[in-house]
Amino acid sequence: MRTQDKLTSIPERYPVACQWELTCRCNLRCVMCYTDCFNRPDKIQDELPTNEIIRIMDELAEAGCLELCLTGGEPLARQDFFEIYAHAKQKGFLVTIFTNGTLITDVIADRLAALPPHRIEISFHGLTEQTFETITQGKGSYQRCVRAITLLRERNLPLVLKSTAMTVNRGEILAIKQFVSGLGSVEYRLGEELRATLDGSDAPQQLTIPEAEWLPIKQQDPELWAETCRTQEKTPAPCTSGMRRFHIDAYGRLQLCSGNRRMSYDLRTGSFKEGFYRALPTFACDFKTDGAVPLIQVSAVHA
């Protein structure tokens, strides 16, 4: 059992944490989603099959990777999800699951409780049904998500609810945060980044809240405002993606992070160690540094 909060003896470049986009398929069509453009049959058929995922996962484990974040799209939309998940647990990874929650039933909640993940993170972008489903474009998705939250809490599973601030939900952000604070051990996270879609559309970024409107909202919450002030005061840290954190997309391509896919290494035809130690260091990043970086905390801070 891990007894330290900090790793103290790993090399500067070491594969600690992987964010793995298992699929771009999803049962929802969220307006800000950057992967939904690939949520179509011709792209889904190109995604890694189970056996390839297992093989690459074994290579990650052999290389010493500790943390594994399974995301999508919606990872539970894969029929083989629990085969993949069980293998990850058997290999000893600290597994985090990113999900929209709407596919979680009593049976799925029981399976997760029988083999608990390190953490489950559910996207919860609206406190009212109207706002929630305006974002997800899925009728009934609000009630299914709320039900999933109840099911996971009943089983004492480690849960995080997270929202992305957008023009569509700006009137509910503070209410969502307050709602989550009343759920006991459930954590809350707020994101502000809206990315262009994988096919290059800037449609999600059109939902960005103008700063003149967003700052007064954050000023109403002491925690959000304090974090905003800290962020504005400190110099941004150089990007260290590819040093200890990395990304794998649905097609088996190794990348620096989910936000930088300009260059990739094909894990279908090459080995993970070759990709991580030889290819990633050559990949371009506008925020990359060659300097030394602190040892990471044992957490699930993913690219």
Image (tube, rainbow, N blue to C red):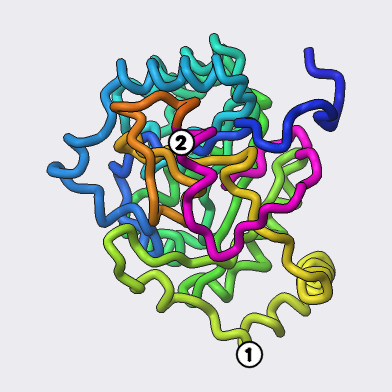
* Residue 107 in picture, x, y percent from top left: 43, 19
* Residue 105 in picture, x, y percent from top left: 43, 28
**For this rendering, which residue is in front, 86 or 120?**
86
Magenta extent: 275-303
* Residue 206 in picture, x, y percent from top left: 41, 78
> Image height check: is 212 above or below 57?
below
Q: Which residue is mark 1?
A: 212
Asked if the residue under mark 1 is in contact with the one under mark 2, i.e. CB atoms within 8 Å, the reply is no
Q: Which residue is mark 2?
A: 20
Cα separation between marks 2 and 1: 35 Å
- In terms of secondary structure, what is the magenta stretch mainly? loop
Residue at 34 percent across and 73 percent down: it is: 203
Residue at 51 percent across and 72 percent down: it is: 166
Residue most extreme to the left: 42
Residue type at the position of mark 1:
Ala
> Image height check: is 238 above or below 102?
below
Q: Which numbered disc, 2 or 1, marks the residue closer to the eye?
A: 2
